[in-house]
Amino acid sequence: MPNLTESSIENLTIELLKSQGYDYLFGPDIAPDGENPLRRSFEDVILFDRLKTAVKNINPDLPEYAIDDTIKQLTQIKTPDLTANNEIFHRLLTEGVKVTYRKNGEERGDIVWLIDFKNPENNDFLVVNQFTVIENNVNKRPDVVIFVNGLPLVVIELKNPADENATIKSAYNQLQTYKQVIPSLFTYNEILIISDGLEAKMGSLSAGYDRFMSWKSIDGKKVAPKLMSELEVLIMGLLNKNTFLDYIKFFILFDKSKKEDEKGQSIIQTTKKIAAYHQYFAVNKAIKSTIRAIGKDKISNF
């Protein structure tokens, strides 16, 4: 992969995602002042029109105001703690959003799904580069953001391997800065990715640099060749539509533990944990084996 630059790595990332069936839009084009504005302001981190279209498609029997209430609930996740906000969103994403509405004179409760986990192709996958966000008068522009149904689920920060000062660690540090100054983008984040085009690592919102991991297999059957870039393996192995949604649904959790603060008082600390590639493939292999075993015995004991 000769003549690597940050721009060429960005283009490679986009092309790899397009090969997985993602749509692509250029961030400045969809900005409020762009040629095809999909945002009312630079503070908007959700692509609301795409979200509403997708939610209506996934939940066709719900009235319009129930869908509007669903979207409103997403925008009202605003506790002082970013990890807490992220946990609230993850629960809404994976368990559905509870709404009530009146039908035929009766009040009904229902669950609105933001993603069709059973049918990956029934979702809107989009990659956007140079996505400018302004929050509290601070202007930042993450390199690549992946949206599913208008929700910014993945942020990718890239660095040029030819620049000795722009390491993959500096990409991690850049994400930590983003979390501080444009936290609204990360309320809806599921996975963070850092790469220099060759090396690539993924981690959770709360993970330290030492917890960021490579994704080393595309199919789970064998480790990818060493000459293959880690970025390509990660995109092909994790961010293909089926694996990506399965991973979000079942392989992300929030762990709570007691800690003592500086004053010696007990506090509850929440850590977001995401599975490593070998854990993901091992669990799914075990599940498939169990299903085959049940099928072979024809569940005769039930």
Image: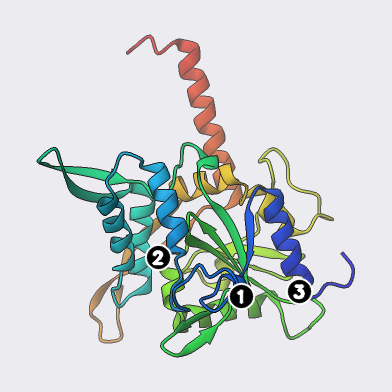
| Neighbourhood count class around disc 3 (C-alpha, 10 Å): few under 14, some 14–19, many 20 upward | few
| 3 or 2: mark nearer the eye | 3
Label 2 SS: strand
Q: Counting residues from the N terminus, which is met first, the one under dot 3 or under dot 2?
A: 3
- Residue extending farthest to the left is 105
Residue 92 appears left or right of 209: left
Residue 35 appears left or right of 218: left
Front position in the image: 264 or 160: 160
Which residue is pictured at 76% across the width and 62% down the height? 12
Quarter of the picture holding the N terminus: bottom right
Instruction: Please name the residue that numbered disc 3 is placed on.
Output: 7
Label 3 SS: helix
| Neighbourhood count class around disc 1 (C-alpha, 10 Å): few under 14, some 14–19, many 20 upward | some
Label 1 SS: helix
Q: Counting residues from the N terminus, which is met first, the one under dot 3 or under dot 1?
A: 3
Residue 101 appears left or right of 220: left
Q: Amino acid at mark 2?
A: Thr
- The image's colouring method is rainbow
Instruction: Please name the residue that numbered disc 2 is placed on.
Output: 271
> How far across and down, in percent of the image, does residue 244 sit?
55, 49
